[in-house]
Image (cartoon, rainbow, N blue to C red):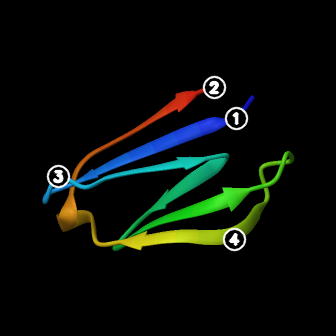
Amino acid sequence: MGRKITVILRDGTELTYKNARIVEGNKTWIYQVDKNERPEELLAFIDPNHIRKLYTEED
């Protein structure tokens, strides 16, 4: 079981990340996490102005 993050950008591009965590601030950071929820790898660094919709769901 893990968390699935879906990001839909303003241009319609849909990005999906599994077993990831979001950190939001001036930029949106999406990290791959291990089973203990510790960050392992940076998957995406996105300007929030380019995001149309962002949501998470549990697998």
Q: Are marks 3 and 2 in contact (CB under 8 Å)?
A: no
Query: Which of the 4 quarters of the picture holds residue 47?
Result: bottom left
Q: Give the percent coordinates (x, y) of residue 23.
A: 51, 60
Give the position of the N terminus as an image quadrant: top right
Give the spatial CA distance, label 3 vs label 2. 24 Å
Q: What element carries label 3?
A: loop
Q: Give the percent coordinates (x, y) of residue 27.
A: 37, 72
Q: Which residue, given by chain and number where applicable, does mark 1 sit on?
A: 2
Give the spatial CA distance, label 1 vs label 3. 25 Å
- The earlier-in-sequence mark between 1 and 3 is 1
Q: Which residue, given by chain and number where applicable, does mark 4 sit on?
A: 41
Residue 59 image label = 2
- Residue visible at 67% across and 46% down? 19
Q: What kind of residue is marked 3?
A: Gly
Give the spatial CA distance, label 2 vs label 1. 5 Å
Q: In screen coordinates, is 43 left or right of 49? A: right
Q: What kind of residue is marked 1?
A: Gly
Q: Which of 56 and 8 is in front in this view?
A: 8
Give the spatial CA distance, label 4 vs label 3. 25 Å
Q: Is mark 2 on a helix, strand or loop?
A: loop
How many other residues sit within 10 Å of disc 1, few (<14), some (14-19) or many (≥20)?
Answer: some
- The earlier-in-sequence mark between 3 and 2 is 3
Q: What element carries label 4?
A: strand
Q: Are marks 2 and 1 in contact (CB under 8 Å)?
A: yes
Give the position of the C terminus as an image quadrant: top right
Q: Give the percent coordinates (x, y) of residue 38.
A: 79, 58
- The earlier-in-sequence mark between 2 and 1 is 1
How many other residues sit within 10 Å of disc 3, few (<14), some (14-19) or many (≥20)?
Answer: few
Q: What element carries label 1?
A: loop
